[in-house]
Image (cartoon, rainbow, N blue to C red):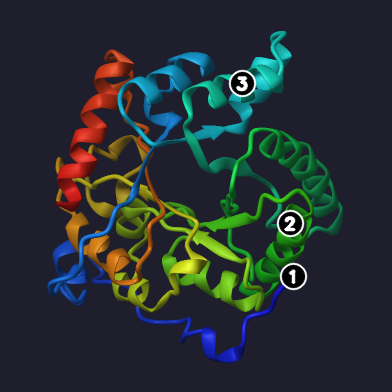
Amino acid sequence: MRRLTSGRICTLFLGHGAAGGGVTSTNAHLNTGDTRMADFIYCLNTATIRPASLMDKITITAETGYDAIELWVNDVEDYVEAGGSVGDVAKALDDTGLQRPSMISLREWCTEDDKQFAEALDAARRRLEIARALSVAHIVAGPPGGVIPLNIATERYEKLLEVSLEYGVPASVEFLGFVKGINTLEDAWAICGGTGMSEATITPDAWHMFRGGSNFKLLEEIPGDHISCFHWNDAVTTPPREEQNDSHRVFPTDGIMDLKALADVMRRKDWHGALSLELFNPEYWKRDPREVAREGLEKMKLSIA
């Protein structure tokens, strides 16, 4: 593994956004000057069309025009338990030509309990085997619901990353805006940068940045090669930011976020990674999944134009 030089690690702790979570006030700090257009990889996180079967999710993603897919490993596990095989899934993916920039996820790794951590690593190895068989580029490392010291989280992530590198599928730190612990971009970057490892990455999420009150300006300072993929979605004004949950995510351009400003930050980094549409909106789950996927892709493109 390679180590970051100290000059690559920027200041990790900056102030959070406005207490009210107003995206306008937070995004006002972003440099939104003219920038060279750059292509992104358009990816569908399959939670967006959750009611569809695993194989239908793959087919729908390809048929509606996405470049890539972000599967949930538990869907693959359920498929295998029902009598299918990982090989079946790999063939379906290969037949479509979809890229696989990321997969969801590794859990329970961010704990102070040594026994629980050892068990989490065993579970991670099983999931990493699946990710490797499916030619996934990164796998998301989900944070705990509770508070954990950042130094412990950094140590645990570094070990998890070392294990994941054995499988060729680096783990990427995720933050969740509605949890008590690792809930901001600042937290995730502190953990990632704190390892000193060049393979360490984070998985930003536009809605989680809003929900957790992240400092949007920090995104400008994070090197592009430490961002695996970017979960793309929008936020609404009601209920209040602090009361929102996953179900309140909406299609890009249907909310209040300046997603074009976020995309332009990534363009200035010369970052050409995946924007992954990740939504958990039960109203969308009631609709035809092809219509949802198609509308999502159209609005992703509109949001960054």
Q: Nearer the viewer, residue 214 or 267?
A: 267
Q: Earlier in the sequence, mark 1 or mark 3?
A: 1
Q: Is residue 98 above or below residue 80?
A: below
Q: CA distance from mark 1 to mark 3?
A: 31 Å
Numbered label attached to residue 1: 1
Nearest the viewer among 148 and 219 is: 219
| SS for dot 3 | helix
Query: Disc 1, disc 2: CB below 8 Å?
Result: yes
Mark 3: few/some/many CA within 10 Å (<14, 14-19, 20+) = few
What amino acid is at disc 2?
Answer: Leu
Whole-angstrom CA distance, mark 3 to mark 2, is 24 Å
Q: How many C-alpha atoms fall within 10 Å of the one at disc 1: few (<14), some, or many (≥20)?
A: few
Per the image, label 2 sits on a secondary structure element best described as helix
133 vs 40, left or right, is: right
Local secondary structure at mark 1: loop
Quadrant assignment, res 249: top left
Please say whether residue 181 is visible from this viewpoint: no
Judge depth for marks 1 and 3 and give the one in front.
3
Q: Considering only vertical position in the picture, is 91 above or below 163?
A: above
Label 3 sits on residue: 91
Q: Position of residue 95 (x, y in %)?
A: 53, 21
Amino acid type of the residue tagged 3 in the rendering: Lys
Q: Which residue is mark 2?
A: 165
Image coordinates for residue 234, horizontal then vertical, percent: 24, 46
**Residues packed near mark 2 inside 10 Å, few (<14), some (14 to 19) or many (20 plus):** some
Q: Nearer the viewer, residue 147 or 24?
A: 24
Which mark is nearer the camera, 3 or 2? 3
Residue 33 position, x and y percent, is 13, 75
